[in-house]
Amino acid sequence: MSASATPRVLVARAVFDEVIERLRQYFEVRHNQGDAVWPQDELIQRLQGADGVFVTGTEAIDTRLLAACPQLRAVCSMAVGYNNIDVAACTERGVLVSNAPDVLTETTADFGFALMMAAARRISESEHFLRAGRWTRWGHDMFAGGDVHGATLGVLGMGRIGQAIARRGALGFGMPVIYHNRSRLAPEIEVRLGARYVAKDELLRQSDHLVLVLPYGPASHHAIGAPELALMKPTATLTNVARGGIVDDAALAQALRERRIAAAGLDVFEGEPAVHPELLTLPNVVLTPHIASASLPTRRAMAHLAADNLIAALGAGPQAGKPPTALNPQVLGVTR
Ligand code: 8YV
């Protein structure tokens, strides 16, 4: 970007009009308010000459794109997860990357809890039954599921969202909480959350309701596959609000079909928006289209945070040079 020219930014997916208007105060903005999903080559072509890009969790910012877009200085995402962005390659090229943490924590935790409850109490399955006109009489064990209150809540991945889910379980539903994480929480946080650290196998064996909230990467690929599912209780539920690929969907479908676990709640899938065909046929899984952070206030906050970062990263606005949630602030010579 030359010192005098107005920086150019590309907004890769549709976003709230007010966010486009904010960006227009500082930049020449190209956008995608028609919300086409551009193939990678088209994204690269549209990025030619752009100083910054506003992305979501779905655009791949990889080495090929970076090599083809040498002018790019900032990649700002409205997602907290950033497995779609090669942060190391961006850092090597001096490209600032930001994500959108914190603003979606409580909303995503609400949804994770709702999905877990829906799976345990068979809400989707029973609604389908009712809508199909099959409800003709009451039955003593009709759609009888597992209890949530008082049951053991297991959390795999105890970051911000995991902690918010643990808090809901412990304080709201009287659930003993166990967790496993790369690093153990400080003792005072464990006490505040009422959460007990256990080994992964113990988490799998003891959880009545296991919720996955860990980041996706090579280390967490298929963290839950056939061997892990085999350790779970036949009455347990599994909920994933993190990323597709953490669960081996084929192995999960088999476990659900064979009732080796009771039920699952899935908001994310391997290869989404495609969903493993067998999952679509099973009654004991609640399926939602990656909407855990989708409350309107939260989606607005996520988009504005990405815009804050983009504006600051390109040296404009009140936080010029200090993007608030940069992942590699060292490229700008600042520390967080
Ligand atoms: C988003 C998410 O809906 O923030 C994330 O990591 O998975 C979701 O909250 C989506 O990725 C937004 O682009």
Image (cartoon, helix red, strand yellow):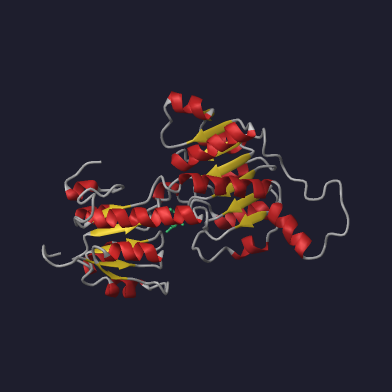
Q: Nearer the viewer, residue 300 or 247?
A: 300
The quadrant of the picture occupied by the C terminus is top left
**Taking 325 as reference, is 242 left or right?**
right
Query: Residue 158 at what x, y percent from top left?
Result: 47, 38
Task: Say if 116 sits above or below 126 in the image.
Answer: above
Query: Residue 213 at what x, y percent from top left?
Result: 49, 45
Q: Nearer the viewer, residue 66 or 6?
A: 6
Task: Say if 46 sits above or below 188 in the image.
Answer: below
Residue visible at 53% across and 40% down in the picture: 165
Task: Say if 161 sits above or below 64 in the image.
Answer: above
Residue visible at 40% across and 59% down in the picture: 57
Q: How many marks?
A: 0
Q: Nearer the viewer, residue 190 or 172?
A: 172
**Taking 293 as reference, is 10 left or right?**
left
Residue visible at 76% across and 64% down in the picture: 131
Ligand 1's image quarter is: bottom left
Query: Residue 253 at what x, y percent from top left?
Result: 62, 56
